[in-house]
Structure formats: structure tokens, C-alpha cells
Image (cartoon, rainbow, N blue to C red):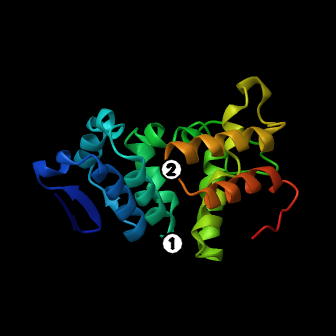
């Protein structure tokens, strides 16, 4: 269904399109191996966007969990972003794209970039999947901030709790993960050394 050569992941047969979960698997393998993805494969992934909604929540969560185990989990989300499918199952994360941040505190630009940097840093600091997940979702409330309020995100800690609940319920993420993610949203501004 796909091959890996010259550090490039490439769809090699028509069977790739038979299971849309392969979109997430390709992103996960790219994250695990730090490989690029062939442009034609990215286009196939884009074409499968409408099929992704039929995947079971459990299968999507399983791929997310495996991606969080890699040493650079941001690549998983970057691949989904490039294939324009991030919003299908991870719309709360997709909403962080373009959510402006104060340059003084976040020179990386927007809330999405900040989240990806924090996620990769968490992968260096711990192997605990729940903690990595809690870092991934800590700023989800910023995706709800109106553009005219940028770069400030007043109340994003509380707004993020609902976003975490929505994501977790939709993907059937374990309650222990949801609890950890909600705590991360609520407390991350007060506990700078949470990890």
C-alpha cells in the first residue's frame, strides 16, 4: 500500500485508498521516522478527506496515541495540516492555526506553532502519553478567541476545558486523559513548571 525509500513515504498501490486510516498511518510513520511524504501521496490523502469521517473513533485515537509516542509528534499534525485533513478529527487543534500570540512570549508566531513546539518538548521530557496529550491540548481555548482580540486570549484556560471535552468525547479518549487535559488547560498559566 505504501513504501518507504530515500526517507520518503510513497503510496504504491491502489489499496492505499481502500482504508482511509492509512492517511493517519502515513502521518504517524512520518512522525516516527522523520521522513518526508511524496507529493502525490499528499494529494491522495487530500482526496480521501471525505472518507475520514467514516473511521471509528477508536481507530483514530489509536493512531493519535501511537503518534504521541514518537520523539517528534508534531510531524503527525504537520502532515495532516499539509494534506488539509487536520480539521476532520482534530478541528480544535486546527483552529489554533493563525491564532496570534504576543511576540514577547511566543516568538514562534501563532498558537498552533507554540503547541507543536511544546508538544515536541514534552516528548523530550517524558514518555507519559497522558502528559504529552495534556501539552497538546493545553491552549485549545485560544482557538476560540476572536481575531480582533489577538494577540491576547483572555479566559482561554476556561474555554479550553470545553474544547478538550469535545475532542475527548468525539474520539473516545479515556477519561483519565481528558481529566489530565482539562487540568492542563485550567492550570498551565499558574504552573509554569508543570512538567
Q: Is residue 114 left or right of residue 62?
A: right
Q: Quadrant of the N terminus?
A: bottom left
Res 94 → quadrant: top right
Q: Nearer the viewer, residue 74 or 67?
A: 67
Query: Element type at marker 2?
Result: loop
- Residue 42 position within the rendered picture, expressed as x and y whole percent measured from the top left: 30, 46
Res 146 → quadrant: top right
Residue 172's mark?
A: 2
Q: Where is 133 relative to 139, above or below? A: below
Tell me the crowding category of disc 1: few under 14, some 14 to 19, or many 20 or more residues within 10 angstroms, Cα based. Answer: many
Q: Nearer the viewer, residue 24 or 72?
A: 24
Q: Nearer the viewer, residue 193 or 186?
A: 186
Q: Is residue 34 left or right of residue 146?
A: left
Disc 1 to disc 2, how far (Cα)?
A: 24 Å
- Residue 12 position within the rendered picture, expressed as x and y whole percent measured from the top left: 14, 55
Q: Is residue 144 left or right of residue 18?
A: right
Looking at the image, is mark 1 or mark 2 nearer the viewer? 2
Residue 71's mark?
A: 1
Question: Can residue 117 be seen by looking at this rendering?
Answer: no
* Residue at x 61%, y 46% (from the top left corner): 112
- Residue 135 position within the rendered picture, expressed as x and y whole percent measured from the top left: 66, 59
Amino acid at each position: 500500500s505504501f513504501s518507504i525509500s530515500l526517507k520518503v513515504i510513497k503510496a504504491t498501490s491502489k489499496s492505499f485508498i481502500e482504508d482511509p486510516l492509512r492517511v493517519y498511518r502515513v502521518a504517524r510513520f512520518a512522525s516516527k521516522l522523520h521522513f518526508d511524504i511524496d507529493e502525490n501521496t499528499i494529494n491522495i490523502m487530500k482526496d480521501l478527506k471525505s472518507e475520514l469521517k467514516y473511521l471509528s473513533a477508536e481507530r483514530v485515537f489509536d493512531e493519535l496515541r501511537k503518534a504521541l509516542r514518537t520523539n517528534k509528534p508534531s510531524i503527525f499534525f504537520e502532515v495532516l495540516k499539509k494534506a488539509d485533513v487536520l480539521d476532520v478529527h482534530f478541528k480544535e487543534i486546527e483552529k489554533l492555526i493563525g491564532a496570534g500570540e504576543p511576540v514577547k512570549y511566543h516568538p514562534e508566531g501563532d498558537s498552533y506553532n507554540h503547541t507543536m513546539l511544546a508538544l515536541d518538548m514534552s516528548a523530550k521530557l517524558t514518555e507519559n502519553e497522558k502528559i504529552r496529550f495534556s501539552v497538546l491540548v493545553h491552549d485549545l481555548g485560544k482557538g476560540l478567541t476572536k481575531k480582533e482580540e489577538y494577540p491576547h486570549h483572555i479566559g482561554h484556560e476556561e474555554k479550553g476545558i470545553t474544547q478538550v471535552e469535545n475532542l475527548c468525547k468525539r474520539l473516545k479518549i479515556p477519561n483519565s486523559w481528558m481529566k489530565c487535559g482539562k487540568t492542563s488547560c485550567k492550570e498551565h498559566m499558574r504552573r509554569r513548571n508543570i512538567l
